[in-house]
Amino acid sequence: MRLSRTAKRILPPIVIDAARYLLRNGSHGEASEMRPEWEYMPDGWHTKDPHIQGWNVQSVVAAQEKKWPKFLQLLQGPGTLGIAHEASMPTNDDFAAHNILMSYGFVLATAARKLDCVSLLDWGGGIGHYCAISKALVPEATIKYHCHDLSLFCQCGRELLPEATFYDNEEECFKQTYDLVFASGSLHYAKDWRSLLARLASVSRSYLFVTRLPITSKAPSFVMVQRPYRYGYHTEYLSWSLNRVEFLRYARSLRLHLMREFLVNPGQPHVVNAPEQPDYRGFLFRPDSQG
């Protein structure tokens, strides 16, 4: 059984991915894989579940590495950059991904303005997708790309991008400062997100960009689980959905000036049983000392 051409034409990529997963696995998938992809966890970070193994899992790295050649191909030429590199079958026509990359392009161009070389720390950058994305968005800029992630991702990234610097020891990447510190879809996976935000701010010379951050406007911050099996990731992980006022109040306490807020992907993800459905947003900060 296959998806019809009509379905492929009218359904968004996220729905198509879910449908393909169900068609492929049917009733033979593990019980855990048939539960909601996103779900509210009332016990928060105290949740006990053997399926919650976090990110440092070989299947995640293997899935991303397998799609790497296609990802690089999609970056070439003058076409659209709606590339969701974590989709099961990456294309260049994902509207939400296009919004994410164009927002990042604005931030990178702002950080690189008047600089001969811009240093970038990509916190939680996986195998280094934003190294290649940065070159495609601002090809005239010289970029020193630094990435922190877990050991399995760094091992793969060093092989794919020998010109980049990967840190699996977070203390190493905090020994210097950067023109742009960038956390895309990563801050909310830290149990102590406040301490992490403070550390990222401390090594930012000019700009700090936190994006793809699940945000609520009314409900207090809460914890949710993601079960990303349809991406080929055989794991589950906890993360925050942060209250916007709480997040921005803490950022101000760090003397971070909000330069621009971005609407990344309103209405996503849908979290079953959540007190409020989060939106993905981005926040570009500048340390007050930089004016």
Image: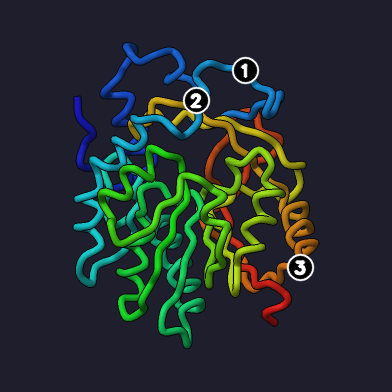
Disc 3 crowd, CA 10 A, few/some/many (<14, 14-19, 20+)? some
- What is the C-alpha distance between the residues marked 1 and 3? 36 Å
Residue assigned mark 3: 255
Q: Residue at x 40, y 30 (%)?
A: 57
Of the numbered discs 1 and 3, the one sitting upstream in the chain is 1
Q: How many labels does the image show?
A: 3
Disc 2 crowd, CA 10 A, few/some/many (<14, 14-19, 20+)? few
Q: Which residue is drawn at 68% across and 72% down?
A: 287
Q: Residue 222 carries which label?
A: none
Residue assigned mark 1: 48
Nearer to the camera, 62 or 96: 62
Question: Which numbered disc, 1 or 3, marks the residue closer to the eye?
Answer: 3
Disc 1 crowd, CA 10 A, few/some/many (<14, 14-19, 20+)? few
Q: Mark 1: which amino acid?
A: Lys
Residue assigned mark 2: 53
Q: What element carries label 3?
A: loop
Q: Is residue 282 left or right of residue 64?
A: right
Quadrant location, the C terminus: bottom right
Q: Is residue 115 left or right of residue 247?
A: left
Q: Is residue 81 above or below residue 269?
A: below
